[in-house]
Amino acid sequence: MIEKFSLVPKEYRKKDPRSLLFLYPNSINIVAYAKSMQKFAFYQALEVAEDLAKRQGYILLPWSCIHWQRAKNFGSDRKVKIGRKSFFLMKPNELTKSESMKLEKYLDELHEKEVC
């Protein structure tokens, strides 16, 4: 189960904001466009990082799911920073019980937001 999860929402590509600037050059709200573009670029970068991690046999573990001392021990060699969020490259068998529970809770919250 843990090897097949994704931190990227399934439907994020349907709300691609890049064409909005071309279609509505005079009437688009710049702040709203910048926010949606930032969110889209974050998910795009996260998708690439997740794909590369899976090809090497790792999963991406969000910073909120790992203990700070354990994160400090892994250092910068397994840390991936996308935007303001940090993720760690971990093998599925390296996860502790609490990390896997936190990850499942994180995924439930993520997919709950997706449905709403």
Image (tube, rainbow, N blue to C red):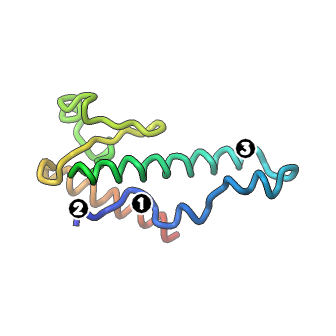
Q: Is residue 90 above or below residue 71?
A: below
Amino acid beneath label 2: Ile
Q: Earlier in the sequence, mark 1 or mark 3?
A: 3
Secondary element at tag 2: helix
Q: Residue at x 18, y 35 (%)?
A: 70
Amino acid beneath label 3: Val
Cα distance, mark 1 to mark 2? Answer: 15 Å
Is residue 55 or residue 30 the one in the foreground? 55
Quadrant hosting residue 77 = top left
Secondary element at tag 1: helix
The reply to whether the C-beta atoms of the residues labelled 1 and 3 are less than 8 Å apart is no
Q: Residue at x 35, y 53 (%)?
A: 51
Quadrant hosting residue 20 = bottom right
Q: Which residue is mark 1?
A: 110
Amino acid beneath label 1: Leu
In the visual, does 114 lie left or right of 28? left
Label 3 neighbour load within 10 Å: few <14, some 14-19, many 20+? few
Q: Which mark is residue 22?
A: none
Q: Which mark is residue 2?
A: 2
Secondary element at tag 3: helix
Q: Which residue is mark 3?
A: 31
**Which residue is most to the front?**
55
In the visual, does 61 lie left or right of 85? left
Q: Earlier in the sequence, mark 1 or mark 2?
A: 2
Image x and y of residue 72, in percent: 22, 29
Cα distance, mark 1 to mark 3? Answer: 24 Å
Is residue 26 or residue 108 the one in the foreground? 26
Image x and y of residue 6, in percent: 35, 60
Label 2 neighbour load within 10 Å: few <14, some 14-19, many 20+? few
In the visual, does 27 lie left or right of 110? right
